[in-house]
Image (cartoon, helix red, strand yellow):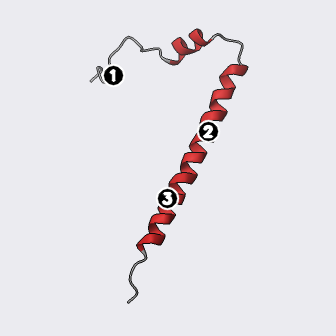
């Protein structure tokens, strides 16, 4: 029986993490550029995004 090649497996995991991190960065950059194109001011967007800003998390249960 062949012994496992842990170095290869580790390298594959590292490559997968790097790929996932790059994809996440691209999504973040794409999302970050969209709100700038809108005409609404940033303060209005922040308030609209968090309607329950005054409540504590998990307080409904």
Residue mark closest to the camera, 1 vs 2: 2
Mark 2 or mark 3: whose residue is earlier in sequence: 3
Residue mark closest to the camera, 3 vs 1: 3
- Residue 47 horizontal/vertical position (percent): 52, 12
Q: Which residue is mark 3?
A: 14
Q: Residues within 10 Å of mark 2 (few under 14, many from 20)?
A: few
Question: Is 41 positioned to the left or the right of 53 in the image?
Answer: right
Residue drawn at x 54%, y 52% as measured from the top left: 18
- Residue 23 horizontal/vertical position (percent): 60, 46
Q: Are marks 1 and 2 in contact (CB under 8 Å)?
A: no
Specify the quadrant that holds the N terminus: bottom left
Q: Which mark is residue 57?
A: 1
- Give the tally of numbered discs: 3
Mark 1 or mark 2: whose residue is earlier in sequence: 2
> What's the distance in space between the residues labelled 1 and 2, CA to CA?
26 Å
Residue drawn at x 57%, y 42% as measured from the top left: 24
Residue drawn at x 44%, y 70% as measured from the top left: 7
Query: Relative to the observer, which residue lies in front, 58 or 6?
Result: 6
> What's the distance in space between the residues labelled 3 and 1, CA to CA?
35 Å
- Residue 46 horizontal/vertical position (percent): 54, 15
Q: Are marks 2 and 3 in contact (CB under 8 Å)?
A: no
Q: Which mark is residue 27?
A: 2
Q: Secondary structure at mark 2?
A: helix
């Amino acid at each position: 029986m062949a012994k496992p090649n842990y170095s290869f497996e580790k390298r594959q995991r590292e490559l997968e993490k790097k790929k996932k991190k790059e994809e996440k960065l691209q999504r973040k950059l794409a999302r970050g550029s969209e709100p700038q194109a809108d005409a609404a001011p940033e303060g209005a967007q922040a308030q609209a995004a968090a309607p329950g800003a005054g409540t504590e998390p998990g307080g409904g249960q």
